[in-house]
Image (cartoon, helix red, strand yellow):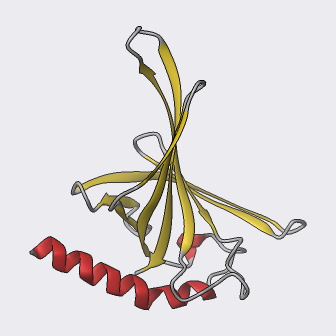
């Protein structure tokens, strides 16, 4: 019951808080503009040399806390430290790069380039993607390089 109430509260917060995302600037690092984001998983893509799969992310909720440099995985009640950040603004192309590095080897990129008056709506958040590259063994004990990307839509808390 408590988890259901928390999820409903989170949903309300996302809907109400998302309007302020339209005021974000791609010229300033995201973590200098907001303290916390709630991110809802959209899709998971998994690629190897011989296959590719896309699935919905189910109910994947991450809370990104830039102040405490942590990401809380809401579904599994686990936290991972943010070990670094990288921001670049490219004025000649009018684009930017906002990346945080997770302590478990993954990285998360936030797309603020699409936050203009023509592409924003009250219910659309900041697009983000988490990428991971790792080795796995298949049934024949061959090492296979796997690339995994989870896409998110994030909202300011």
Q: Is residue 39 above or below residue 121?
A: above
Residue 140, picture quadrant? top left
- The residue under the point 49% across, 85% down is 18
Q: Nearer the viewer, residue 57 or 133?
A: 57
- The residue under the point 46% across, 39% down is 105
Residue 79, picture quadrant? bottom left
Does 50 sit left or right of 36 as displayed?
A: right
Residue 38 in percent (x, y) is at 40, 72
Quadrant of the image for the C terminus?
bottom left
Quadrant of the image for the N terminus?
bottom left
Q: Residue furthest left?
A: 1
- The residue under the point 56% across, 72% down is 126
Q: Nearer the viewer, residue 4 or 26?
A: 4
Residue 134 in percent (x, y) is at 48, 29
- The residue under the point 48% across, 71% down is 154
Residue 127 in percent (x, y) is at 57, 67
Residue 4 in percent (x, y) is at 17, 75
Does 110 sit left or right of 94 as displayed?
A: left
How many marks do you count on the picture? 0
Q: Is residue 150 above or below residue 35?
A: above
Does 117 sit left or right of 153 as displayed?
A: right
């Amino acid at each position: 019951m408590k988890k259901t109430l928390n999820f409903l509260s989170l949903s309300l917060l996302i809907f109400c808080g998302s309007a302020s995302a339209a005021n974000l600037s791609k010229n300033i690092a995201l973590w200098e503009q907001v303290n916390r984001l709630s991110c809802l998983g959209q899709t998971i893509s998994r690629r190897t040399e011989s296959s590719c799969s896309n699935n919905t992310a189910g109910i994947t909720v991450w809370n990104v806390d830039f102040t405490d440099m942590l990401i809380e995985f809401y579904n599994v009640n686990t936290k991972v430290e943010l070990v670094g950040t990288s921001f670049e603004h490219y004025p000649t192309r009018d684009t930017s790069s906002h990346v945080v590095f997770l302590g478990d080897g993954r990285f998360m990129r936030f797309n603020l380039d699409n936050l203009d008056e023509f592409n924003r709506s009250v219910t659309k958040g900041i697009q983000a993607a988490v990428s991971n590259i790792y080795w796995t063994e298949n049934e024949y004990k061959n090492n296979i390089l796997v690339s995994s990307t989870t896409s998110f839509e994030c909202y300011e808390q």
